[in-house]
Amino acid sequence: MHGMVPPDPSGEGVSQAAYATVYMPKRKANRNRFPASCITAYPTAQEALDAARDDDKRVAAIVQGPSKSSEGQYIFYLRQWL
């Protein structure tokens, strides 16, 4: 995807799409990348939606990652809000 940090150079397919909740205490509409500490992965979209339903600071999404940023942090990219 354009504008994303490339996956792990070892080529083991570490960076992949996943259903998740994104912890967002302050909503920024234009934000498209998040630190790994803000992401909780789930096996299905429904589980991510259920986890976000009762928490106004978590939003269900499909994310791509992890990738290692130039600052050395692991990040996930937003692919789609659920």
Image (tube, rainbow, N blue to C red):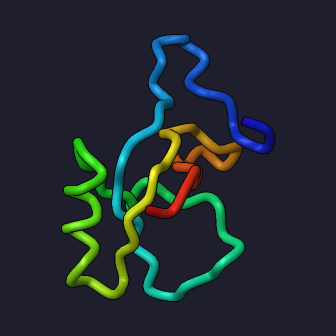
When the figure is inspected, residue 24 is found, relative to residue 9, above or below; the finding is below
Residue at image location 66% in from the left, 69% down from the top: 31
Q: Is residue 80 left or right of residue 14?
A: right
Q: What residue occupies the far right of the structure in this picture? A: 2
Q: What residue occupies the far top of the structure in this picture? A: 11
When the figure is inspected, residue 48 is found, relative to residue 16, above or below; the finding is below
Q: As rendered, which of 38 and 57 lies closer to the eye?
A: 57
Residue at image location 67% in from the left, 29% down from the top: 6
Instruction: Where is residue 5? Give x, y as percent.
Output: 69, 38
Q: As rendered, which of 7 and 52 lies closer to the eye?
A: 52
Report the quarter where the C terminus lies: bottom left
Instruction: Where is residue 21? Give x, y as percent.
Output: 35, 63
Residue at image location 59% in from the left, 44% down from the top: 72
Instruction: Where is residue 1? Give x, y as percent.
Output: 72, 35
Residue at image location 54% in from the left, 49% down from the top: 75
Q: Quadrant for residue 69, please give it.
A: top right
Q: Is residue 72 left or right of residue 62?
A: right
When the figure is inspected, residue 66 is found, relative to residue 48, above or below; the finding is above
- Total tally of numbered discs in the picture: 0
Q: Is residue 29 left or right of residue 58?
A: right
Instruction: Where is residue 30? Give x, y as percent.
Output: 71, 73
